[in-house]
Amino acid sequence: MAPALNIVAVTSCTTGIAQTYMAADVLERCARTKGYAIKVETQGALGIINPITPIDLRCADVVILTDDMAIDDVARFAGMTVVTVTIDDILSAPHEIIDRLTGSQK
């Protein structure tokens, strides 16, 4: 059985439209199929949706950030294990990204 993992993520793409939300959906589905908890904040054309709270951060083992666009308030992730990927990485290989995290657990 896979170890419990609590993930927070922020997705944001260059246009802030479809890929931001598609990547969030893919990460959520992939993590849940592996039995991991996940919360994904999107920063796109609709603004910040599903914001990560201080409680979410305290419970998180790892953070996934996309680097396609600047993420608002990255200082909140200081001292945490952060994995940075592109939107294309998430859309093309979400299982590989999630599998990498088990070795990055704090």
Image (spheres, rainbow, N blue to C red):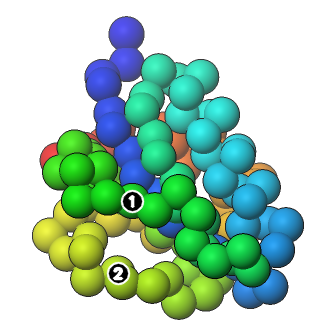
Question: Tag 2, which secondary structure?
Answer: helix
Which residue was labeled with disc 2?
A: 74
- Residue at x 49%, y 83% (from the top left corner): 71
Q: Where is residue 77 in the image (x, y as percent from the top left)?
A: 26, 71
- Residue at x 72%, y 74% (from the top left corner): 46
Structural crowding at the residue carrying mark 2, measured as other residues with C-alpha within 10 Å and reported as few (<14), some (14–19) or many (≥20): few
Which residue was labeled with disc 1?
A: 52
Q: In this view, does 51 lie to the left or right of 91?
A: left
* Relative depth, front residue between 91 and 8: 8
- Residue at x 55%, y 27% (from the top left corner): 32
Q: Where is residue 100 in the image (x, y as percent from the top left)?
A: 44, 46
Q: Which of marks 1 and 2 is in front?
A: 1
Amino acid type for the residue under numbered disc 1: Ile
Q: Is residue 65 left or right of residue 79?
A: right
Residue 81 visible to an observer of this rendering: yes
Asked if the residue at tag 2 contacts the one at tag 1, i.e. Cβ–Cβ closer than 8 Å, the answer is no
* Relative depth, front residue between 67 and 75: 75
Q: Which of marks 1 and 2 is nearer the N terminus?
A: 1
Q: In which quarter of the image is residue 21?
A: bottom right
Amino acid type for the residue under numbered disc 2: Val
Structural crowding at the residue carrying mark 1, measured as other residues with C-alpha within 10 Å and reported as few (<14), some (14–19) or many (≥20): some
- Residue at x 39%, y 45% (from the top left corner): 7
In this picture, is 77 found above or below 99? below
Question: Tag 1, which secondary structure?
Answer: loop
Q: Where is residue 40 in the image (x, y as percent from the top left)?
A: 52, 53
Q: Where is residue 56 in the image (x, y as percent from the top left)?
A: 29, 50
Total labels drawn = 2
